[in-house]
Amino acid sequence: MEVEKNIDTSFIFEKLKSHSEKKSQHQRIGLEIKQSTKFYLVPRDKCIKTQYCNIYSARYLNLVKRFQIDSEDPQFIELIQKIQDQKGTIKAIGTLFKEMKLKPYYFSQNQNKALQGRSYIHIQDYVSNEDVCYLEDGSGRIKLQISNAILCLPNKKEKIVNVSDLVTGITLMIEGQIVANNIIKVEKFYLPSLPETPMLKQLNSNSYLCLISGLNYNALESTTKYRHMIDYLQGNLYSGEGGDIPYNISQVIFTGNLYCKLEETLDQQSLQQDFKGVFSKIQLNIKGVDELISQLASVTPVAVMPGENEPVSQMLPQTPLHRSHFPETFEKEHQLILLSNPTEFTLGDLKILGTSGQNISDIKKCSQVKNQEDVDLLEMTMFYGNIAPTAPDTLISFPQKDQDPFVLQELPNIYFVGNMQKFGTKMVADNVRIVSVPAFSETGTICLINLSTLECFPVIIQ
């Protein structure tokens, strides 16, 4: 058979030329992450001999400055121990403590575990009708009667609250009537004022921050959805309108729970016998996530936070994952940054704060907020001036001697929380965007934020 010699190849070169021009037009602009040291604890700050009371003291001293106090107001009582000598209406500032009958304690928890064996079940909700609230400072505490009290928010709005709506660790000012010895019927709660709102410096082009949480990667199950996610972020998956957006992503952040949670086994003997099988599953999951991140980091910078499923200390702040989890990614010298949880950093000129979700999940356990949107709980932690008020009472954290790292010293431009049930977002102040990022394994949702306008929207990947 004679081979044709006069083949017109001009159209091939035209295609290659247009493809090259398209790639140059979509040149990605990577923005550098500059991490804060706020949540990086040096070894001397991880000393477990330190008492937890220091955290509450540091929290109180920091937030008490943000209340509007009239020093000449005769109703204001500076120290709680002086309230017992007062009558009528009073105002006082302190830290809320909520006594919960169902709150698990270490010794009783392990006693029940020993007695019940396999039938031991973790309590998922600590709220009961017998819960009681107290207000305390360094001088003492008083009991609070709360029935449809008014909570005055920093944004000048108000809401009705009861005992079930509150959690331990909130620093607030109360106004109410003394009804008995060391008992006050609260009429109003006041929260500290917000710090100054940050500036928003416009970028020359539309760049996007991509937030992904809750991969819960399981190598033994279908990984098609994860492959589609990588294809979309690389710009290889047709997405219709807005198809240029993936090329303008300047940073991708995985906000905890990369790996699926291993099934809890109480039978230690069977666990030891099946150790090789369990270890093999862990290896497969780590390798699978490393492959995904290596592919993604080849085209755009990636950052990773630990979560409650990761093999690091569960005490907050959680240390970053070790480099050994990503051998392929680092071997190819891709752009991967390992963050703490919580994390605080700047991206370009934007201040960004985020957690992997333990702070909000613990608030849900300690209060009846099941019908509230996740994004509203994020907003309340900003109003509290503390992103993790229940630490260290029910949310395990490192003891601190001179500071409470969870206090908001300044407002970020973006505050995100991962591993939530639903996507949600709102502007809580000028230039301040909050985002609840749902678990990708459950919803197939990733979140994109325009770094020039702070516009935020979800993308659902099947």
Image (cartoon, helix red, strand yellow):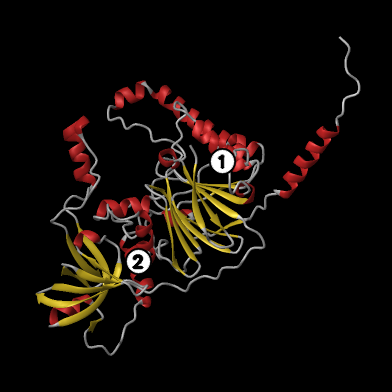
Taking the view exactly as shown, the residue that stands out farthest to the left is 180
**Camera-nearest residue between 130 and 147:** 147
Residue 101 position (above or below residue 440): below
Q: Quadrant of residue 49?
A: bottom left
| Residue name at image x 50 percent, y 43 percent | 321
Q: Secondary structure at mark 2?
A: helix
**Camera-nearest residue between 109 and 370:** 370
Q: Residues within 10 Å of mark 1 (few under 14, many from 20)?
A: few
| Residue name at image x 18 percent, y 80 percent | 82
- Give the x, y percent position of residue 424: 41, 54
Residue type highlighted by circle 1: Arg
- Give the x, y percent position of residue 136: 23, 69
Residue 222 position (above or below residue 436): above
Q: Is residue 71 left or right of residue 29?
A: left
Q: Quadrant of residue 96?
A: bottom left
| Residue name at image x 15 percent, y 67 percent | 147
**Camera-nearest residue between 363 and 318:** 363
Residue 323, labelled with which disc?
1
Q: Is residue 164 left or right of residue 348?
A: left
Residue 429 position (above or below residue 314): below
Quarter of the image with the N terminus is top right
Taking the view exactly as shown, the residue that stands out farthest to the right is 6
Residue 384, labelled with which disc?
2
Q: Is residue 186 left or right of residue 428?
A: left
Q: Is residue 397 left or right of residue 134?
A: right
Between the residue at mark 1 and the residue at mark 2, the CA separation in whole angstroms equals 35 Å
- Mark 1 or mark 2: name the one nearer the start of the chain: 1
Q: Is any atom of residue 325 visible in this view?
A: no
Q: Is any atom of residue 384 visible in this view?
A: yes
Residue type highlighted by circle 2: Tyr
Q: Secondary structure at mark 1?
A: helix
